[in-house]
Image (cartoon, rainbow, N blue to C red):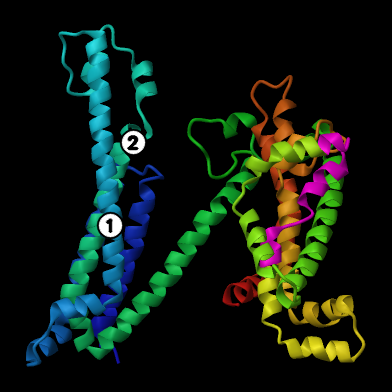
Amino acid sequence: MLSTQKKIGIAMVLTGSVLLLVLLLSIPLQMARTTQIVLAVCCGALFLCAMPLMWRDGIARLRANTVKRNPWLEIRQSGFFDLIKLFVLLAVILGVLCAVGALSYRSTLNRHVALADPTATAATLEEALLLEGFVDFNFKQDLNILSKNYKAFGMVALVLLAISAVCFLYIWFVSPIVRADESLSMAHGVYRTVGQYAMAIFVVLIMLFPIYWMIISSFKTSTELLAPVPTLWPQEFVWENYPNVLKRAPFGRYLLNTLVTTLFITLGELTIGVLAAYGFSKGQFKGRNTLFMLVLGALMVPIQVTFVPIYVMIARLNAIDTYLGIILPNLVSAYFIFMLRQNFMAVDDSYIDAGRVDGMGRIGTIVNVLVPMCKPTVITVTIISFINGWNSYFWPKMVTKTEASRTIAVGVQQLKNTFAGQEVSNYNEIMAGAVMAIVPIIALFLVLQKYIMTGMSKASMK
């Protein structure tokens, strides 16, 4: 059982952790410097006050223990040790990039200073700007990615080194105290659980923030959306953005085109994928594995390499700006063939033999035996194919020329050309169109997410 002083210490540590999170959030939110200092002082005071309350019993038991410790062995056995090595390695890499960037920055600055005035010297950019012939724009254009961001690389390296130092000190000093006190070990289990949930929530918020920003921006005015200081909540909700989208572009036509092409693409990828996966998993013919390796090789070829010959083929078929031109190049997916083959291979051949005894042919065996037994993966392939078809942008952008055949992804991009007569660009209406485009996909994912997770996990384990 936890004593009263340990409960107080736990409460103080949790409170300090919350204040630390608020302190970290205060940096991007640009809170007042006084507020940040108060938060830092309160956070440090809570942690320092919690230490003697929580560690007193553990330190006493550790001193009473006569067994000789091997701290380095304990460190190597700790799960934090691998994390420390990773952070240190990343810090070293970023430190090297920072050094290279700093040298490049200095070399570029000296070169432009010499061009401005061969007799002058400048230690900083501020001093260089005082020179009459120094052109700041030309200097910034000559900087490469390392020289532009070397300070950021150095800052991240320092942060990683600080985290590594904290983890090392924890393993060296705190971990033995925790192991010596059973009740304190229970308390640290609570910390671990709270930390895992906090990290999960933090990651979810990071991933959902772009969607939140898109939805909120769709209700703003163009002026507010383009303001120098962004707002996390609209000052005034503008509901007219959505009707304006429907007036400015044939969104209904875009949705119909997307639905038709996506359904045919999904049907083609599913049908061809199932049949090919059956042949590669249960078929017996020469060169089966070689042909499958060629299929896997297709995964390594990006569409930017193949779209030119595909475009020429579609043009010779007179399928430019038609449904056929969008659908035909996307009827086969090597990735889906791979996923389905992995699952079909896990089905015992005795089920196939039983189906043949019952008088089933190959198609009957596939439909009545393999597909039902691999239902989660088949559903996953169907959902992912539908999502990919719905979100496809590159190929429909290349092959469609008029409003009659454009898909929703291309249509949203075309909205930026419809702001004639407005004072500023209609990014708020573009956001509204993007929201309308993703609603079906989000609804589909929320309803069928369990099948996606099950199918992907099974495919990865086979």
Tell me what residue is drawn at x 72 percent, y 65 percent.
381
Tell me what residue is drawn at x 26 percent, y 84 percent.
184
The circle drawn on residue 238 is none
Q: Is residue 230 left or right of residue 104?
A: right
The circle drawn on residue 146 is 2
The answer to which of marks 2 and 1 sits earlier in the sequence is 1
Query: What residue span does the magenta drawing correspond to?
Result: 314-338
| Amino acid at dot 1 | Leu
| Residue placed furthest toward the front | 286
Between 264 and 433, the residue placed more toward the observer is: 264
Between 62 and 91, the residue placed more toward the observer is: 91
Quadrant occupied by the N terminus = bottom left
Query: Percent position (x, y) of residue 239?
Result: 73, 40
Q: Residues within 10 Å of mark 1 (few under 14, many from 20)?
A: some
Tell me what residue is drawn at x 46 percent, y 60 percent.
202
Quadrant occupied by the C terminus = bottom right
When asked about the image quadrant of residue 233, the answer is top right
Q: Is residue 321 left or right of residue 349?
A: right
* Element assignment for label 2: helix
| Amino acid at dot 2 | Leu
Query: Percent position (x, y) of residue 384?
Result: 70, 61
Residue on which the image places disc 1 = 89
Query: Percent position (x, y) of residue 86?
Result: 31, 62
Q: What is the tally of numbered marks visible in this picture? A: 2
Magenta span: predominant SS is: helix
Between 303 and 282, the residue placed more toward the observer is: 282
Tell me what residue is drawn at x 73 percent, y 32 percent.
415
